[in-house]
Amino acid sequence: MIRTFLESDLYHNFKHTPVAVISLGIFLLIALMAIFANIIAPHTPFEPSTLNLMNGFTPPMHPNDFTGDVFLMGTDNQGRDLFSTILYGSRISLFVGIMAVLLSMTLGVTLGLIAGFVGGWIDTLIMRFADIQITFPSILIAMLIYGVAKGLLPPDMRYEMSITVLIISIGLSEWVPFARTVRGSTLIEREKEYVISAKMLGLTPLQIMRRHILPNILSPVLVIATITFALAIITEATLSFLGVGVPTTKPSLGTLIRIGQDFLFSGEWWILLFPAVTLLMLALSINLFGDWLRDMLNPKLK
Amino acid sequence: MTSKPVKPLLEIQNLDVTLKNRDSYFKALDDLSFNVLPGEILGLVGESGAGKSMTGSAILGLIEPPLFISKGKIIFKGKRIEENAISVRGSMISMIFQDPLVSLNPLRKIGDQLVETIRTHINIDKAEAITYAKNLLEEVGIDRERFNAYPHTFSGGMRQRVVIALALAPNPSLIIADEPTSALDVSVQALILALLKRLCKERGTSIILITHDMGVIAETTDRVAVLYSGRLSEIGKTSEVLNSPKHPYTQGLIAATPRIDADSLKTKLYQIPGTMPDLSEIPDGCPFHQRCSKSIPKCSENNPPLLYDRASCWLLEKESV
Amino acid sequence: MSFLTTSHLSRYFDLSEPWLVRKIKGQPKKLLKAVDEVNIGVERGQTYALVGESGSGKSTIAMMVAGLLKPSSGTVLFNGDNFFNPSLGKIKRMSMRKSVQMIFQSPYASLNPRWKVGDILKEPIKAFSLIEDETNQINRVCELLEQVGLSPRDMLKYPHEFSGGQRQRICIARALASKPEIIICDEPTSALDVSVQAQVLNLLKDLQQAFSLTYLFISHDLAVVSTMANKIGVLKQGILVEEATPSKLFLRPEHDYTKMLLSAAPDISNASRI
C-alpha cells in the first residue's frame, strides 16, 4: 500500500512541486504544534493562577519592565503568553475546521449521491434547496444557524455547547459545493456499465451507491474538502472575530485577532499581528495544497 | 507501371519518436520509413497503440512533450519539415479527425468557418471566398443552401462532409484522415469513403488513411502500411498485402478479421495469441516474435529491417536464399 | 415455445417539451418509437443476433430483455417468466436475475476501477448467495478466471492493470459467475482490436458449447455477426425488418435495407476488387 503510493505519479509530482511540499510542510508544522500544545507551550494561558498581570503588554523578545520575563511573541493585556495562546488557539481553530468539514462533507456527499442517483423530483428538491442556500453568503447562513441554535438552547448549556453549535453552523453552511460536485460525478458514473452490471445482480440502490459509486467519486470530494477546510477555519475566525463564536475563555485564532484589534492603535501591534499571521499561513498553506491537489486530480488539466 | 520512378510527395526516413516518462525513454515510433506518392491513398493500419495516429501527428508537427522526435527526417515536396513550425506545413497538409465536432465550432455557421479557413490560406476577397466555399460544399455533397446552417443541424455523416470541405479549403496536396469513419454507421461510412476516393482521383490529392479496420483498407486504399509496436511490419500494394501477406503479423491480422460469409459460423476465427506489448515491454529483436508462430532464433536477437521493400521479417531473407 | 420470446415489444421515449411549454405552444406530445412491436424468439443454446445501425433500437431491446428498462408495451418472457410481472415473488425474481447476465461494449467502464478483480468476481457469488464459505468462493473465482483464459493470480490485481481484451474476459467471467442460462452481449468486441476480437469471439463460442449458453448478440458489424449467429434479426429504426438464418440472409437478402447494409459493410475479401 505504502509502496504503491511512493511509486505513484501523485507522489512523484508532489516531490517535484515545491509549492506543494512547502505548503504541506507549513500546515503540518502548525498542526503538530497545535496538537502538542500542552507539551510545547511554555505557559498555560487559560489557568488564571499562573498569570501575572504585571506581565501585561510585554513586547516580543523584550524583558518585561517589572518582572524581567521574556516572551517569544510578547503578551496580551492580561499577561498571557501570546505564543502559547496561539498554539492553543490554532488547536481550537483546527478542531472546529476539521469537524465542520467532516459534517458538510458527509451531508453534501450523501445528498449529492441521492440527488444524482435517484434523480426525478428528489433531485430537483435537493438541488433547488442548494441553489437557494448558495445565493446567501455562507457566513450569513452560519450566523443565522448560530443565532437560532443559541436561542433554542437553555441558557446554562449555551456556554459548553458553543463550540458544537459553531461546528454545526459552519458545517451546514458549506455542504452545497460537495453536493453539486458529487451529483455531477454520480450522473456520469451511474451510466457506466459497471453500475448497470451491479443492477443486474439485483443490488439495492443503497448498495450500489455505497459500494460502487461512492469510491469512484471521492477524488473531487478530497479537493473540495481541502479548500472547504481553509474556508471553515476562516469562517470560524470571522465568527469569533465578530464575537459570536467560541467563548473568550477558550480563544481561537479569530478571538485572539479580535482582542488584538483593540490594542492596534495604542501601539501593542504584536497582539494582533501574530495570531493574524498564523491564520494567514494556515489558510494559505491549505489552499495552495488544495490547488495542487486539484490540478493533479482533475483530468481536464492534466 | 511507369518507367521512370515517381517523385514521392512525402518521405519519412528512419523516424524515431521517443516518449520520456520520468527518467526512462521508450520508443513510440522506431525507425519508421515510408513514402506517399502523389495522388494515392495510403492506408496506415494497426492495432491501438501501434503508432498510427502518432505518425500522423509527427507529419503535422503535433508531437509535444513528453514525446519528441529523436531521429530521422520528414521530407515534404523535397523540403525537410520535421523541425519546422506547424505554420510551414500550413496550407499543404490538412487533417480530418474521427470526431467531426473536434474540428467544428458549434457556435458558428459552417459557411463562416469555411470562409475564415479559406481566407487564412488563400488571398482572396470575401465574395470570392463565399463562392469558393459554396463550391466546396457542393463538391463534398452538401446543398449550397446550407451555407448558413449551424453544425448541430447536420447528422454525423454530413458533419464529416463539412470537415472534409474544411480540410479541402486550402487546396492541400496531402490529407491525413485519422479514423474518419469510425464513429459513423456502415451505410454512412461507405459514402464518406467513396467521397474521399473521388476527391483523391479528381483533385490528385494524396490521402493517408489511418484506420484499424482491414475492411476499410481493402475497399479504399491503393497501398497499405501495417504498423506494429511503432515499427513498420509490412508495406505494399493493398491487393498484394491482403492477398499474399509476407509478415506473420499481417497474415494473422487478416486471418483474424471476420468475413461476411454464410459458412463462417461453422469455423472458428484464427487468433493471434497474446496482445501487443506496452511501450515499456517491447522485447528485444522483432517486437512480434513472442506472439509469432513462425519465429526462428534470430527473431529474438535482432530486429529485422524492411526486406525487399516489403516486410520486416527475417523469414523473407530465408525465402529468397 | 422458445427459451426467450419477445412479443409486441415496444418502447417509446417521451421527447416532448415540458408540460407548460407544450400547453402554451399548443404542441402535441412527441414520442420516439425506439422499439416498435418487435417479436423475436431465441432457442436454447443458440445465438440470436440483432443487427442495426445507431438508432435502430438494438441496445434498448437489450436493456428491456435484461430487465433494466420497462417496456412501454409488450412482454419479454424467459421460459414463460416476465421480469415486470408484479406478482413475481422476490425469490423468483432473484433466480431470474441469476439466469440472465450481460456483457458490455466498453471494457473500460464495465469494471469498477476501485475493486480488485477477485472482489469483482466474488460480488455475484455473494449477491446471489451461491457459495457461503470464503475458501470455496475463492476457489470458484479461480475456476472462473481459468475458464476465461486468465490466471488465478490475476484476482489480486486492479482492472487498470489489464489490457482491453483481458478486461473483456473479466467481464465474461463476472457474467458466468452466477451460472446464467442466457448472456446478452451488447457489442462485446466493437471496442477491441482485430486480433483481440478474434480471441474474445472464440472464447464466447467455447463457453457457449461448454455451458450450453444462449446468447442474444447485439452488433452493428455484419462480419462479426456472421461468425457467431444461428439466426439474425435486422433492425431499422425500431422495427424488425428481416429475420433469417445467416446462409439465407447473406446469400438471398430480401429487404432493401439488408441489401444496403450488406453492400455497405467494408469487407476484407474485397481487396481483389481494386
Image (tube, grey):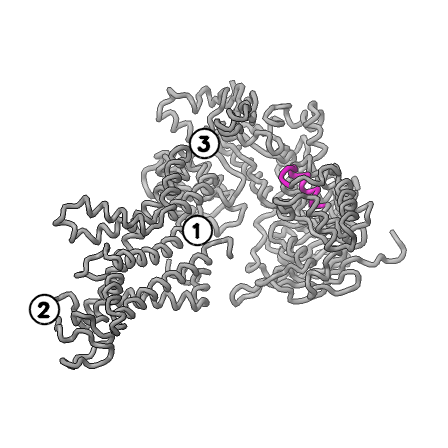
Calculate the distance from the C-alpha at mark 2 to the C-alpha at mark 3: 77 Å
Residue C247: x and y in percent read 67, 27
Position of the C terminus of chain B by quadrant: bottom right
Residue C49 drawn above or below residue B250:
above
- The chain letter under disc 3 is C
- Mark 3, residues whose alpha carbon is within 10 Å: few (<14), some, or many (≥20)? many
Magenta portion: prevailing SS class: helix
In the rendered image, which residue does mark 1 sit on?
Answer: C157
In the rendered image, which residue does mark 2 sit on?
Answer: A49
The residue sitting at 41% across, 34% down in the picture is A201
Judged from the image, the secondary structure of the residue bearing numbered disc 1 is loop
Judged from the image, the secondary structure of the residue bearing numbered disc 3 is loop
Residue C79: x and y in percent read 46, 21
Q: Quadrant of residue B92?
A: bottom right
Calculate the distance from the C-alpha at mark 1 to the C-alpha at mark 2: 62 Å
Could you confirm whether marks 1 and 2 are on the same chain?
A: no
Q: Is residue A297 visible?
A: yes
Q: What residue span does the magenta drawing correspond to?
A: B151-164
In the rendered image, which residue does mark 3 sit on?
Answer: C180
**In this rendering, the label closer to the viewer, 2 or 3:** 2
